[in-house]
Image: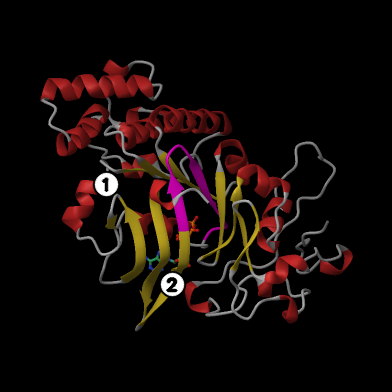
Amino acid sequence: MPDETTHLLDIQHLHTGFRVGDAFYDAVDDINLTLDKNEILAIVGESGSGKSTLATSIIGLHNPKNTRVRGTIAYNGQNLVGLDETAFNKIRGNDIGMIFQDPLSALNPLMRCGDQIAETLKYHTKLNKQERKEHVLAILERVGIPNPKLTYRQYPHELSGGMRQRIIIAIAIACKPPIIIADEPTTALDVTIQAQILDLLEDIEKETGSGIILITHDLGVVAETADRVAVMYSGQIVEEAPVNELFAHPLHPYTRSLLNSMPQLDNVEDKLHVIQGTVPSLKDMQPDGCRFAPRIPWIPASAHEAHPTMHEVGPNHYVRCTCYKTFHFQDALSSVEGGIVNVTD
Ligand SMILES: Nc1ncnc2c1ncn2[C@@H]1O[C@H](COP(=O)(O)OP(=O)(O)OP(=O)(O)O)[C@@H](O)[C@H]1O
């Protein structure tokens, strides 16, 4: 692991629990993770695995009445956990830029696009009105808007989905934040635009040296864009590795299942395999033991750790629980249940 002092962000023992009835349930359960300059760290996992909760914990977007956040998110000598709204407002946009999945709901429909970018500059910089306008035009050009002067005056609904996402990226990078969190930034876009937006994010990372947390359920996006990957399942990280290592030597049964459920362009004859079962809801999460065990019932209980920990299995490669050592995909013939073809190798 890189020297601790170089980490942009150092998350230790992060728990984020939501109130359900009278109790809190951890959607993020003891996460340890670092982000460095000049890297794109992908957080990948199925819907409900806790990816967005991790992101919103970092930028303090939770209602404290219904949410309990514990642990440390060290940034620039301070712990972001427990900061009040005033302190977070200074950090959001200036230190941490945020790119959301749905640009239409993230933008103000009644405000011109240029003014929305200028607003961030107004709040965080001492630039005067004219300087802000010039800066916004330069950013619009940087994010690939073909006619910045026209788009400055346009409202979000006048733009295509791809262009709107470029506006969101412009807002996120306006103050050159060292950290950018992109939560499913391309999910709502078609494939061609998706590739352009991912290229843009990569260029920004190279130009500015920022660290980007890229949240996605799409392993194709991960393969194309990320430097390092953390795989999340049921609120926990189950595997973490540099991207090439993860794709070449995936170890955790969940990672292997996710990879096996990806369509392979070079093997069109193959069936698309589906992972049986679903991510448990908050109340149904097992407090201890291997949380993926119920989805691989053919693996004996003795293969799992009672209290799973992360094991270092190679340089910067970590995997949770010992079950990866004995895991194998179930035989295809015996695994057809309820119309679902289970993963096989
Ligand atoms: N405000 C909330 N109150 C209660 N439960 C919540 C809240 N937000 C999320 N959850 C629950 O926390 C768990 C993790 O959700 P989260 O949205 O972080 O997952 P995700 O991996 O980002 O999924 P998706 O890709 O669908 O957003 C889920 O069980 C979800 O229902």
> Quadrant of the rendered structure where residue 84 is?
bottom left
Residue 92, label in figure: 1
> Quadrant of the rendered structure where residue 62 is?
bottom left
Q: How is the image coloured?
A: secondary structure
- Residue situated in front as seen by the camera: 6 or 142: 6
Q: Residues within 10 Å of mark 1 (few under 14, many from 20)?
A: many
Range covered by the magenta-colored residues:
33-47
- Of the image marks 1 and 2, the number of the one nearer the N terminus: 2
Q: Quadrant of ligand 1?
A: bottom left
Q: Residues within 10 Å of mark 2 (few under 14, many from 20)?
A: many
Q: Position of residue 303 (x, y in %)?
A: 74, 76
Q: Secondary structure at mark 2?
A: strand
- Whether label 1 lies within 8 Å of ligand 1 gets the answer no
Magenta span includes 97:
no
Left or right: 25, with 273 as reference point: left
Placement of 305 over or under 220, stated as above or below: below
Q: Pointer 2: what residue?
A: 26
Placement of 134 over or under 249, stated as above or below: above
The residue type indicated by label 2 comes to: Asp
Q: Position of residue 158 (x, y in %)?
A: 34, 28
Magenta span includes 41:
yes
Left or right: 343, with 61 as reference point: right
Marks 1 and 2, how far apart at CA: 24 Å
The residue type indicated by label 1 comes to: Arg
